[in-house]
Amino acid sequence: WLRGLLGVVVTVLVLAAWAFVAAANNLAVSSAGDAEALNLAGRQVFLAERLAADALAAGNGVDSAQPLAMTLDRMMDDAVRLYELRGVWGSNDEEPEHWTARRERLWAAAQSLQMARERGDSRLEPFVARVQGEARQFIDAMERAVGELQKLAEDRHRETGHAHAVLVGVLALGITALLLGLGEPLARRIQRHHARLAEQAQQLQRLALVADRTQNAVVIADAQARVVWANAAFTRVSG
């Protein structure tokens, strides 16, 4: 049973180590994901500002529409990655003031400006004004969303850290209880073994005393028939 108990202790220790490593890895992955999501969310604000500036340049004929298209594509790519990391957060995403709805309208305005440039429209001012207006509204909504995302990340980090601490504490208590439960039976077993050895030593001492004082000849030889001990009676008989 002692070996079985030792096996249980080793199994629990292995599971505890695995759980600790898994919890630490989850915390690291979650923290890395939060950091990347916050960076992408902040970059959405930057790209919206860039989109408004590119729209103004394109409307004034200062530059071609290519920078506008590149900024729009990059903003869309970042949005896909942001959704993969954290999905949609904040209030109801079906509301017209939600940051995702604002972003869709900004994209639509930028695409309308692109198509107007491709058609060769002479009056681009309404399209430019629409892009800039949608960009301002999206930036305001996105800045609030970034604050909400930051709070969600802090709450998740706090909850994960708390769960990690609780897990480690519970496992430590369990291991301590098992070790205490193992130590008491082991101590009793050692105590019984020591008592048996002491009793056997006393018996050997009594037998040695009897053999030494008996009138009968007593001799002890090894496997090669060499005498290793003989009592006084044997000495008198053998001379």
Image (spheres, rainbow, N blue to C red):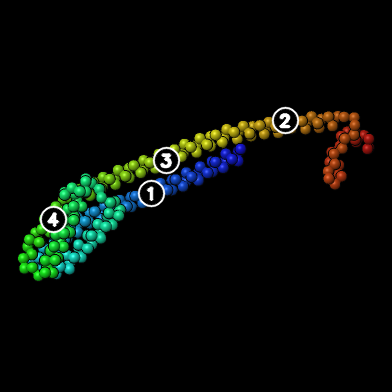
Measured in 3D between alpha carbons, the distance from the residue under mark 1 to the one under mark 2, in whole angstroms, is 58 Å
Confirm whether residue 58 shows in the render.
Answer: no
Mark 1: amino acid: Asn
Residue corresponding to mark 1: 26
Q: Earlier in the sequence, mark 3 or mark 2?
A: 3
Mark closer to the observer (2, 4) = 4
Measured in 3D between alpha carbons, the distance from the residue under mark 3 to the one under mark 4, in whole angstroms, is 48 Å
User: Secondary structure under badge 4?
Assistant: helix
Q: Give the class, few, some or many, for how many residues have Cα within 10 Å of label 2's Cα (few <14, many ≥20).
A: few
Confirm whether residue 120 shows in the render.
Answer: yes
Q: Earlier in the sequence, mark 3 or mark 4?
A: 4
Image height of 234 relative to 110, above or below = above
Measured in 3D between alpha carbons, the distance from the residue under mark 2 to the one under mark 4, in whole angstroms, is 96 Å
Mark closer to the observer (1, 2) = 1
Position of the N terminus, as image quadrant, is top right
Check residue 89 in the rendering and tell me which mark sits there, or answer none. Answer: none
Residue corresponding to mark 4: 134
The spot of residue 185 in percent (x, y) is 59, 33
Check residue 199 in the rendering and tell me which mark sits there, or answer none. Answer: 2
Mark 3: amino acid: Leu
Kindly check if marks 1 and 2 are in contact, taking CB atoms under 8 A apart as contact. no
Position of 20 with respect to 238 (left or right) is: left
The residue sitting at 36% across, 51% down in the picture is 29
User: Secondary structure under badge 3?
Assistant: helix
Quadrant of the rendered image containing residue 227? top right
The spot of residue 202 in percent (x, y) is 75, 30
Measured in 3D between alpha carbons, the distance from the residue under mark 3 to the one under mark 2, in whole angstroms, is 48 Å
